[in-house]
Amino acid sequence: MSTMEVQGDVARVTASRLADTYLRVVATVVIAVVMQVYLHTTWGWLWALAYLLCCAIGLWVRRPSMIDPDAPVATWRRLAAFVAPAITSTAFGALSIVLFSSHIRFAPTLGGMLLAGALLNVVVINAGNRSATLMASTPHVLYLLVVPFVAKAANPGANLADVLWFGAILMIASVAVASRTLDAALKAEADAKAEAERRRHEAEEAVAAKSAFVAMISHELRTPISAILAGAARLHSEVPEASSKVHAQLIADAGGLMRTLLNDLLDFSRLEAGRMSVEKSAFNLRQALSDTLRFWRPEAARKGLRLRVTGAASLPRWTAGDAMRLKQVLNNLLSNAIKFTERGHVTVLLDAQPVGDQIQLSITVHDTGPGIPDAALPRLFTPFDQLNATVVRQYGGSGLGLAISRELARLMGGDLTAANASKPGDGGEGARFTLIAMLETAETPRADDESRSITGLRVLVVDDHVVNRRAIELVLEPFGVDATLTESGEEALERLRSEVFDAVLMDLYMPGMDGREATKILRSRDGPNRDIPVIAVTASATPKDWEACAAAGMNAHVAKPIDPAELFSALAQVLADAIASPEDVDVEASRA
């Protein structure tokens, strides 16, 4: 047994004996009272006082180890703590000798019961520590071996006293077996805990390995998906034939579906690992919800459904929260409602109520579809679970959307619930999903008079993968942006040393010098592009990654696969900030 295990056993035994002190005090007082009332002896109180004094001394010598188990203890205290159980057991068991030598009826029986109880208590309290068990039980064992002599001497004519030998030996053997059984049970429990801990570590390592694998696969998958989406968008805008446009749209829809499935897997992986979080920034709530609803109106119209919205006028305009996650949940609810509704309408009920210094946003999506079977409601938010095999064959999907949406709602301080809109059986009762999210009030930002055009900008694109570089170039060309492509951080720094650019789109993970290191070097040296806006482009879209990008000197970020609107917004924002910064400095200088 290792030193740490021994120290752990000693600490556990000490704590157990300390907790048992109250029971011993009460038992001792009760025994003294019984002896006073029924045996009419006053010396029982002297015995109780002596025994409690021994217990107090034992606690005193152990006091340093009880306060701090790792603190060094003087040698004399260790020795005293070692022999203290034997002293207290000797003091307690001394009463049995007096009772066995008494001529009072049933007094020897009481003495035997006290010894048996004391011995069993010693085994239980000191289980796992052999030295403490041996020291505390030895006096009781000796008393059991001595009491037959005492009983024989006190009752010379009683042959029954010889039977006490058999009883004493049987008691000692029974207690020894109980001690071994208890030790085996404790060892089995310790082994089970160790095995559970080992399995927990293995599970954590497996989850970490899975997360790393998902992150790696996602990074590799985002490259072709970016190219598919960018190429499809470019083809759709350039080809004149209607049939070709249909084919391009089909490619774009398939790429969008792949991106949605990939995002669901990544979000679920982050939720499992506890790394998912929500941002808090000011956004136009009405505009965000309006954009989301406008996106789904063509799909609803294609199926002949009416998409109705009520309560929008009651919403505040500017709030603080995570607009992207809010739209993600609403997109999922609208997608499901339209997907499962064949006729009728989809109604979105909006409401916002002040709760303290926050705003409780309520969004209810009610459809006139077939509804949800009552048996399926409890598992509706279970990951990878679909209502039935028919749903999978007809509609597809990963079974992650609602599970992720509920977790996101809870991260936003609310919840996502589901219910049938009316009683089943009345024909098209439909389903009702209610999203609750807590937002904060935000001031209306000042109007931005700067132009949002990025036409004519010269942007350096840094990415080690040729498909990614070409995809970004395809996204930038319709905006009138001149893109210069480089494949490494080293090559990018050489370009930035001699040529002037308006912005840099920097991939984070590249062989050799990665994007953050290249940005740090750019910021640390003189040159025409030292303060140029740098936008991180990466598939690893976690808050921790964004914090590391900001620490490296990057100004913004966009996630792969690249959304043209997101890239446009990021470029426009960093350029507007770059233009505003000198003016802010001049204003502060004039005030000084």
Image (cartoon, helix red, strand yellow):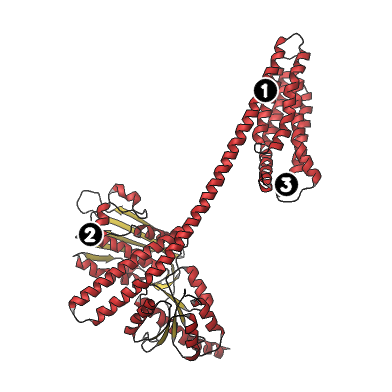
Counting other residues with Cα less than 10 Å from the Cα at mark 3, is it few (<14), some (14-19), or many (20 or more)? some
- For the residue marked with disc 2, what is the amino acid? Thr
In this picture, residue 60 sits left or right of residue 176: right
CA–CA distance between discs 2 and 1?
78 Å
In primary-sequence order, the first of circles 3 and 2 is 3
Q: Is residue 293 visible?
A: no
Q: Can residue 223 be seen in this view?
A: yes
x, y (%) of residue 429?
Answer: 23, 53
Counting other residues with Cα less than 10 Å from the Cα at mark 2, is it few (<14), some (14-19), or many (20 or more)? many
Return the residue at label 3.
Answer: 65
In primary-sequence order, the first of circles 2 and 1 is 1
- For the residue marked with disc 1, what is the amino acid? Met
Q: In this view, does 298 lie above or below 454?
A: above
Snapshot quadrant of residue 128: top right
- For the residue marked with disc 3, what is the amino acid? Ser
Counting other residues with Cα less than 10 Å from the Cα at mark 1, is it few (<14), some (14-19), or many (20 or more)? few
Q: What residue sits 35% from the left and 58% below the top?
A: 402
